[in-house]
Image (cartoon, rainbow, N blue to C red):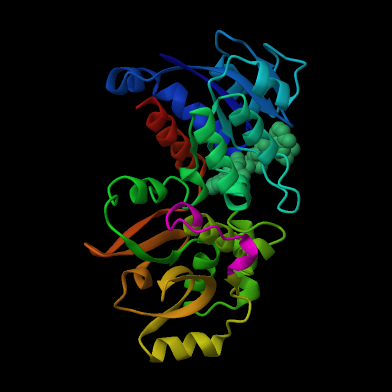
Amino acid sequence: MKHKIALLGFGTVGQGLCEILADKKNYLKEKYGFEYDIVAVGDMVYGNVYNPDGLDAAQMLLEAKDKKKFSKDVSKWDNLTLIKKSNATVVCEMTYTDLETGGPAVEHCRAALEAGKHVVTSNKGPAALKYPEMAQLARDKGVQFLIEGTVCSGTPILNLADGPLAGCEITAIRGILNGTTNYMLTEMEKGMAYDEVLKIAQELGYAEADPTGDVEGHDARGKVTILANVVMGASLAVSDVSCKGITGITPADIEKAKKENARWKLIGSIEKKDGKLIASVAPEMVPLAHPLAGVMGATNALTFTTDMLGDVTMVGPGAGRIETGYSILTDLIKIHR
Ligand SMILES: NC(=O)c1ccc[n+]([C@@H]2O[C@H](COP(=O)([O-])OP(=O)(O)OC[C@H]3O[C@@H](n4cnc5c(N)ncnc54)[C@H](OP(=O)(O)O)[C@@H]3O)[C@@H](O)[C@H]2O)c1
């Protein structure tokens, strides 16, 4: 069966995915029997295009690189019409989410699932705000709602818990879920002041112009909510997760950690205690001997505590064009299988 793919959002991740799909077209067919057409793209910057027999990926990538609007197969259909009326069998949601309203990503995912189409997304919004609703809708329609890219980009966290760790009871998940703050803490340990490090993180493209979401821990809190609900079977709202960022960490705190053979990390944590699930984000002094202490720079890492394997730690990238595009590819292959 040939998969008919719609891409919603053709920014960093959408273009990364499009490039991977184009580059690996033959490999995916030979190795996995995975064949596809990208039939629809909806993007605020480049416009909406539709061709039921397949769009020209190379041309779209060139036009996007030149910051030009798409010129071929231009469609008057808006995003929701593209989702409902196109012949797409799977919708990849890679736009953004307003955390107050859930729009536009929640509407995109809901419309696709209601139309009986699989959804794959790297967008935290629908997963953190509406996972139980989306998962139920997918079950009702006999399709899949897959979200690997929402936690640690392409580093296989959710698929690890669902696949290789199946059968283990996971009693705790703890880790570094935000690369920007981990980069900042790494540099602060070398002696740089908070404001100076933040400026460099912004210049390097790690931190947004408004860094609140990262430094106050809100980004990590969304990911903790997803992990609690998807891996630990909870039904937490984002506001159920206590949250403290790194803005209060001082040079004196850094020195204190060094003296105690420890290192500050912004830790997202979900633990089962006395039948209750406790979820939080907060800076912690992690002993140097712990695997998470050795994770430096913009890298992410998570330790699963399990009943049969003890601790299992996964370390890998938490962002990036190809890395996050890959997260979508891995879920597309899962649907194919
Ligand atoms: N980049 C990463 O490394 C990474 C990692 C993990 C997860 N994610 C998540 O993946 C998603 C995509 O990230 P990204 O880095 O690709 O973002 P991006 O570069 O900003 O791309 C998003 C694209 O979607 C467009 N868009 C916004 N609202 C839209 C709408 N209503 N309809 C159609 N298009 C719309 C944007 O246009 P405008 O520019 O006009 O808004 C932009 O072209 C986000 O939810 C992000 O949080 C990204």
- Which residues fall within the magenta stretch? 229-241
- Evaluate whether residue 252 shows in this view: yes
Quarter of the image where the C terminus is located: top left
What residue do we see at 54% from left, 69% from top? 184
In reply to whether residue 234 is colored magenta, the answer given is: yes
Please identify the residue farthest to the top as the structure is shown. Answer: 53
Picture coordinates of residue 97 (x, y %)? 68, 46
What residue do we see at 38% from left, 47% from top? 156
User: Taking 127 as reference, is 322 above or below it?
Assistant: above
Q: Quadrant of residue 74?
A: top right
Q: In terms of depth relative to the viewer, which is nearer, 129 or 233?
A: 233
Q: Is residue 136 left or right of residue 31?
A: right
Q: In which quarter of the image is ligand 1?
A: top right
In reply to whether residue 63 is colored magenta, the answer given is: no
- Evaluate whether residue 119 shows in this view: no
Q: Quadrant of residue 77?
A: top right
